[in-house]
């Protein structure tokens, strides 16, 4: 079995939002505490693959405690998905090799610019930098650490996010739509789990809002669907009830530290 661990399930601010007085941000239900969205795959062959380096990466890895990281996949270069990149430093140091970091050419260009101290380093005095090897992924199939991945381009406002499928898991976050050909391909693959963006109850310019998320789940027809990247408009238990009321019995709101298995 392959395992995906939810390192974080929250929108870009994390939940609670600093200074916010709303009911969800002040809730005592631990299911409403959400670090920034990221997942960790441990494959049946024992490979460890991190997806995104959020600003919460250090605390996420302190909780998850992986022995090693074999590869990192970066979905897109927004602050909530990349700004923890420097916390890869200890892993590249202890493992004594360049950590491969896979992303689209668009994301690669953006993170080369933003983190130029890592990717075009001048001689460093003191400290150190994460030793990363940037690998640009094409759309379609690609083997990473002897594992077959399939990559898709998803529209996310003015930029694109890289969604992927690994065996019977698909991960589609930070997108305002999912192209019909991607839905059809994923339906064909008979997914065990679809992890999908659902930022808020109402429509959103750069993310999937509730109705759109449901529409995509119905097109893909996975065995189970897990909603992620949730904002403070969502109370965990109320979202669960709403999914049940709407007949989406295969869908659940994910929460931090959930562990899902897939073939
Ligand atoms: Zn995001
Ligand atoms: Zn984003």
Image: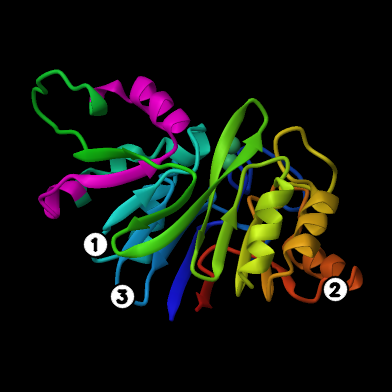
Q: Which residues are magenta?
A: 92-117
Q: Nearer the viewer, residue 15 or 20?
A: 15
Is the residue marked by circle 1 packed among few (<14), some (14-19), or many (20+) residues within 10 Å? some
- The answer to which image quadrant residue 27 occupies is bottom right
The image shows residue 201 at horizontal and vertical percentages of: 83, 49
The residue that appears at 86% across and 66% down in the rendered structure is: 242
- Count of numbered marks: 3
Q: Which mark is residue 244?
A: 2
**Residue 87 vertical position relative to residue 24 in the rendered view, above or below:** above
The residue that appears at 48% across and 41% down in the rendered structure is: 81
Of marks 3 and 2, the one in the foreground: 3
Q: Is disc 3 in contact with disc 2, using a CB cutoff of under 8 Å?
A: no
**Residue 263 vertical position relative to residue 180 in the rendered view, above or below:** below
Q: Nearer the viewer, residue 155 or 173?
A: 155
Q: CA distance from mark 3 to mark 2?
A: 35 Å
**First in sequence: mark 3 vs mark 2:** 3
Circle 3 SS class: loop
**First in sequence: mark 3 vs mark 1:** 3
The question of residue 105 being in magenta is answered with yes
Q: Read off the residue under disc 3.
A: 45
**Residue 73 vertical position relative to residue 219 in the rendered view, above or below:** above
Q: Which mark is residue 201?
A: none
- The answer to which image quadrant residue 114 occupies is top left
Ligand 1 - quadrant of the structure image? top right
Q: Read off the residue under disc 1.
A: 68
Question: Label 1 CB, ligand 1: below 8 Å?
Answer: no
The residue that appears at 61% across and 69% down in the rendered structure is: 189
Q: CA distance from mark 3 to mark 1?
A: 14 Å
Residue 226 in view here: no
Left of 105 or right of it: where is 121?
A: left
The question of residue 177 being in magenta is answered with no
Of marks 3 and 1, the one in the foreground: 3
């Amino acid at each position: 079995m392959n395992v995906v661990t939810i390192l974080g399930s929250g929108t870009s601010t994390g939940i609670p939002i600093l200074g916010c007085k709303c009911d969800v941000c002040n809730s005592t239900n631990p299911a409403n505490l959400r670090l920034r969205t990221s997942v960790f795959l441990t494959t049946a062959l024992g490979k460890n693959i991190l997806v995104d380096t959020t600003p919460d990466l250090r605390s996420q890895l302190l909780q998850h405690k992986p022995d090693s990281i074999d590869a990192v996949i970066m979905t897109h270069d927004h602050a909530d998905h990349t700004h923890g990149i420097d916390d890869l430093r200890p892993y590249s140091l202890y493992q004594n090799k360049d950590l491969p970091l896979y992303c689209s050419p668009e994301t690669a260009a953006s993170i080369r610019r933003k983190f130029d101290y890592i990717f075009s380093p001048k001689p460093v005095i003191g400290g150190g930098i994460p030793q990363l090897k940037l690998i640009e992924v094409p759309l379609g199939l690609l083997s990473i650490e002897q594992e077959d991945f399939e990559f898709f381009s998803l529209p996310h406002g003015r930029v694109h996010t890289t969604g992927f499928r690994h065996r019977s898991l698909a991960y589609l976050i930070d997108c305002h739509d999912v192209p019909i050909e991607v839905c059809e391909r994923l339906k064909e693959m008979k997914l065990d789990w679809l992890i999908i963006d659902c930022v808020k109850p109402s429509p959103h310019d750069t993310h999937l809002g509730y109705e759109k998320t449901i529409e995509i789940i119905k097109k893909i027809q996975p065995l189970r669907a897990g909603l992620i990247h949730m904002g403070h408009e969502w109370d965990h238990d109320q979202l669960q009830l709403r999914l049940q009321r709407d007949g989406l019995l295969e869908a659940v709101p994910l929460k931090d530290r959930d562990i899902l298995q897939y073939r």
